[in-house]
Amino acid sequence: MPVAGHMHDHLDGIVTRFAPSPTGRLHIGHAYSALFAYNKAKENGGRFILRIEDIDAGRCRPEFVAGIAEDLRWLGLSWEEPMRKQSEHMDDYRAALDTLAGAGLLYPCFCSRRDIQEEIARAPSAPHGPEGALYPGTCRSLSAPERQDRMEKGDAYALRLDVAAALARLDAPLVWEDLAKGRQEAHPEILGDVVLARKDTPASYHLCVTLDDHLQGITHVTRGEDLFHATHLHRLLQHLLGLNVPVWHHHPLLLDEEGKRFAKRNHAVTLKSLRDAGSLPEDIISRFD
């Protein structure tokens, strides 16, 4: 894997990205996030990259990839070609998984979602994180022969990161710079032993986004504050894989009149429906001022 890089703390020649999943049409919240990244790059003489996060083959659709490009062009954005599509780079993610496995930091988990819920219900003091109950570590203690036996039998499994084992290798706390929140110390244990790959999805969001940001030279990761907690884990993965450490800027989420975040299932706020109803790009952009 590449050698660890340095932290970027200046704005000259910065590289930002917008990285949507093609599981629906873009909505007004996406427009805010895309423009936030685009403007940060352009105001600082930098570069803006569009990446398509399409590893979830069951939910991603080619027509939504085309829709993303159409909506962003309508807003006046341009980006570098060719556009990286995660589904075309599975070898990169497999190599990263092999690195983690070779370091003894991955283990197969054979628990179904129901198994995990039942285990949590049985344990009165199940550990909790910012997103709810954590995986209780049921499969972490399986012996190597047991794991091998179950995998050979064809049991479905996910690959989890052994966070405690990873943290035991650190000789100093991991930190990151957040332009909205200041200097942060990473505590990836708040997310537990996250899944980094499944049989039907050979690499997870966490692994792919961290590796792609490195491979594409992203210096400033701008994204919604709903992903703030994920950064604790991403910072650990960067350390374990020897990746560059960007600066982050977790911006506020755009909320609707009821104070709820915009969602793809609410078709009324898609950029396409607003455009079809007569909105102009400047009508959308002026909402963010």
Image: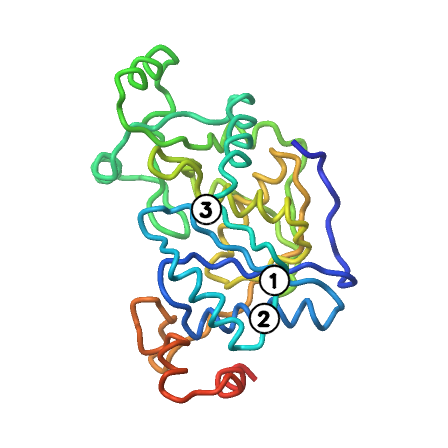
**How far is the residue under mark 3 from the one under mark 2?**
21 Å
* Residue plotted at (38% across, 70% down): 261
Please give the residue where the numbered disc 1 appears in the rendered image: 249
Residue 284 vs residue 160, the one in the foreground: 284
* Mark 3: amino acid: Tyr
Front one among 237 and 58: 58
Residue 33: x and y, percent? 52, 68
Where is residue 274 shown, x and y percent of the image? Answer: 39, 82
> For mark 1, does the 10 Å Cα neighbourhood hold few (<14), some (14 to 19), or many (20 or more) residues?
many
Numbered mark located on residue 218 in the image: none
User: Of the residues under marks 3 and 1, which one precedes in the sequence?
Assistant: 3
User: Which of the two discs, 3 and 2, labels the residue nearer the N terminus?
Assistant: 2
Question: Where on the picture, by quarter, is residue 180?
Answer: bottom right
Task: From the image, tell me which residue sits under label 2.
Answer: 36
Q: Label 1, label 2: how many angstroms apart (C-alpha)?
A: 10 Å
Can you give x and y, in whole percent of width and height, for residue 10 in the image? 77, 60
- Closer to the camera: disc 1 or disc 2? 2
Picture quarter containing residue 183? bottom right
